[in-house]
Image: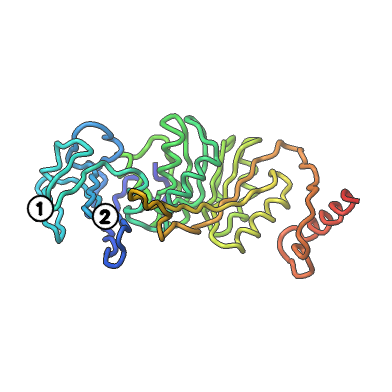
Amino acid sequence: MLRSRNLRGQLWKSFAREGDSDEGNEGVTRPTLETATSTLAGMSTSAHRKGPFREGDLAQLTDPKGKLHTVKLTSGKVFHTHRGGVDHDAIIGLHSGSVIAATGGAVYLVLRPLLDDFVLSMPRGATPVYPKDAARIVGLMNLHPGDRIAEAGVGSGALTCSLLKAIGDHGQLFSYERREEFAKVAETNVTTWFGSHPDSWTLKLGDFALDLEERDLDAVVLDMLAPWECLEKVAASVSPGGVMIGYVATTTQLSKFVESIRVTGEWTEPRAEESLLRTWHLDGLSVRPDHRMNGHTGFLVSTRRLAPGAQLPPRRRRPAPGAYGEDYTGPGSDRAVAEQNNAKQLES
């Protein structure tokens, strides 16, 4: 449910986001959401995964160039393109995987959209966590059906959808968002994807660093500007052995977050990584990487909660020369010097 500031039950209008032109971008597909979402009533996507399309379902149309268009099926409406129109009524009743012709003769493949496609075409408040990162986050969190987890920064609801799918109907996700306008967009997007507000989801307006009250959580993901501000709260909420994931955009944030984790002494040695995704061109004997790839979008930091009173063994690996030199003023500068000296003693 959506809590605080009388947001429960409010409806949010999400305007269509038109795709970029394909001119000069052969082979690049850009999903578009053709229909604005003016009410939560009657929406459905994943709620109807099988059987014929019904009114209110989302349908994904792929044109001859591979460009994706996502439309919300409404009786009496027409999807217009420069290749002609496609009647929504002609799609309603078809099965996913059907082929339909526009009035201009162009043929479209009709499918139910995957979550990846929906995320790229959904109305946005904040920049979403893209599918390549969301998939890795779910894996790093080691999620199972029934897990209890928390999310700081709901953004547009993209990562929220992936988390809810992973924990299932018997899990529980507590999402915190500071900005009301982002919470409204996320509420609409998540409800659109699942067909109704998931019972396993609690969306709260508030500051994660101040308002987090859940305990015995299996995992937490922090998608925020300053994740180091809430380490104390997270440590009190995550069960021993539980996972904390941070998603940050810059190396400055990355360094400060990792060093802040080390200073607490309550987490395992953090690990940082990024996801890079490259598709391939395949035509007969012409097999090569595509000229474009999905490069850096953010850094993922993963660590696990230590048991109360446990202390990590000292690191034997000496930090790189100058890593904690006289110019370093970040978290744990005193600890870093002591760690360098300890590494030297262990090597001698």
Please indicate whether residue 134 sits to the left or right of residue 302 in the image: left
Looking at the image, which is closer to me, 164 or 322?
322
Please indicate whether residue 40 sits to the left or right of residue 342 in the image: left
Whole-percent x, y for residue 323 in the image: 74, 63
Residue displayed at 36% across by 57% down: 124
Which secondary structure lies at badge 1? loop
Whole-percent x, y for residue 84 in the image: 11, 56
Location of the N terminus by quadrant is top left
Query: Rounded to the nearest whole Å, what is the CA distance between mark 1 and mark 2?
Result: 16 Å
Q: What's the image's color scheme?
A: rainbow
Amino acid under disc 1:
Gly
Amino acid under disc 2:
Lys
Looking at the image, which is closer to me, 138 or 219?
138
Residue displayed at 12% across by 48% down: 101
Looking at the image, which is closer to me, 329 or 251?
251
Vertical side of 149 occupied by 125: above or below:
below
Find disc 2 in the rendering and name its residue: 67
Q: Can residue 7 be seen in this snapshot?
A: no
Residue displayed at 21% across by 31% down: 51
Please indicate whether residue 25 sits to the left or right of residue 54 in the image: right
Residue 116, label in figure:
none
Whole-percent x, y for residue 131 in the image: 42, 48
Q: Can residue 232 be seen in this snapshot?
A: yes
Looking at this rendering, what residue extends furthest in the front direction?
Answer: 285
Find disc 1 in the rendering and name its residue: 105
